[in-house]
Image: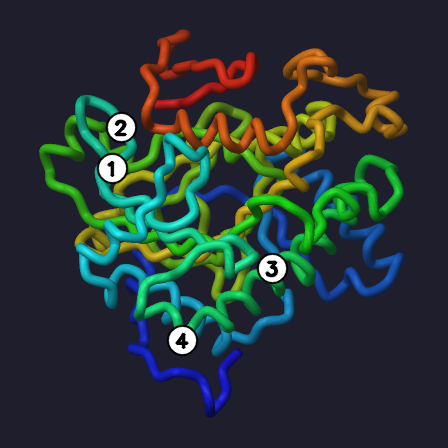
Amino acid sequence: MPSATLPTIPHYLPAPLTKEPLEYADLTVIDLSWADTFEGRTKLAAQLRDAMLKHGFFYVINHGLSQAQNERIFDIADIPFAAVPDEEKKAYAGNIKATGSYQGYKLRQYWHIGGGVYDQVEHYNINRDVTKKQHPQALRPLIPEIETFAKFNHLQVLHPLLRLFALGMELPEETFVNIHGYDAVGESYVRFMKYYPRSEEEETKTKNVWLKGHTDFGTVSILWSQPVASLQILSPDGKWRHIKHIDNALVVNAGDAMDFLSGGFYKATIHRVIQPPPDQRGYTRLGAFYFTMPNDDVKLVPFTESPVLQRVGVQRRCEDADAPTMEAWRKGRTSAYGQTDLKAKGEGVEEEVINGVIVKHWN
């Protein structure tokens, strides 16, 4: 990544760390450097399995990128927002509802959050096949670096983690890797995302929630840790707890597709984004992500041959005959998110039905 020949771009300065006494989730730290040996992978698989059963989120360290390379990624991540005029953003906006794809921009005020308030979030999404769409002028010199970043996340982070997920279910190591081909037809993608501060009126109407509690729809979500303390997970005891920032760490969770494929053993993790603590208000929250999904043609049915599932039982979200493909699931979830009228189902829980499967949201 960083070298003398790379394009010169402004350096992004993140918000300072909060000094507020927040309640943080006590997450497991997975040291990916151990994954080079089978013995190391066996130990990591046990750690990952326990982390998934306890919290559904974990950190990854020693993934292979330096702090300087990390900072370069965040410099690049800010370009779609700070260096692209609003009119050009509109020209590259995705037709999300019609296509079921986030590729391109999701502009602000597209998702309904609550109380008649819409989001103040922009994101720019780039398929790992960076040639699928044209990109804004300011991003074009940086596309080779973004492609390298996508490939790194897919092959050097995702695939090693998928081997651990498989070992945790006593399946052959390549079970999940084999359905996450880098060159296969699919939608795993890089997302650069920026949350902007909101008015006090909007905060009041939404009870300070910026993005209501939800699950991701893919297999594994990779968030490059950043300092604005807004991300919370719903802990097993019913409390929302913050995720603490660790320099150059990854924050990883499972989504719906992993829930389907693992027969409910690795549950999709419920998380939300709220207003930052007082000493970080006024700052934007810039994120760099890699959202992963199986190949589009994969039918989302459990790997019932897992000895673990045979012991603990399978929890299906639908009958196997009715299970969607990954393509159908991602398109259905993407088209509906923030656009449909959700039905209240108990205190703080709303529901919708996608491809015949109930999807819950927490507000």
- Residue at the far bottom: name it: 4
Residue hosting label 4? 141
Q: Secondary structure at mark 1?
A: loop
Question: Pointer 4 and pointer 2: residues touching (CB < 8 Å)?
Answer: no
Q: Amino acid at mark 3?
A: Asn
- Place residue 219 in its image quadrant: top right
The residue depicted at 76 percent of the width and 25 percent of the height is 302
Question: Circle 2: is it few (<14), some (14-19), or many (20+) Cα within 10 Å?
Answer: some
Q: Secondary structure at mark 2?
A: strand
Tell me where residue 113 appears, x and y as whole percent: 27, 29
Tell me where residue 204 appears, x and y as whole percent: 15, 30
Tell me where residue 58 appears, x and y as whole percent: 59, 47
What is the spatial separation of the Cα atoms under label 4 and label 2, in whole angstroms? 34 Å
What is the spatial separation of the Cα atoms under label 1 and label 2, in whole angstroms? 6 Å
Question: Circle 3: is it few (<14), some (14-19), or many (20+) Cα within 10 Å?
Answer: many
Disc on the earlier residue, 3 or 4: 4
Residue 119's mark? Answer: 1
Q: Is residue 275 visible?
A: yes
Q: Amino acid at mark 1?
A: Asp
- Place residue 226 in its image quadrant: bottom left
Q: Secondary structure at mark 3?
A: helix
Question: Pointer 1 and pointer 2: residues touching (CB < 8 Å)?
Answer: yes
What is the spatial separation of the Cα atoms under label 3 and label 2, in whole angstroms? 30 Å
Question: Pointer 1 and pointer 4: residues touching (CB < 8 Å)?
Answer: no
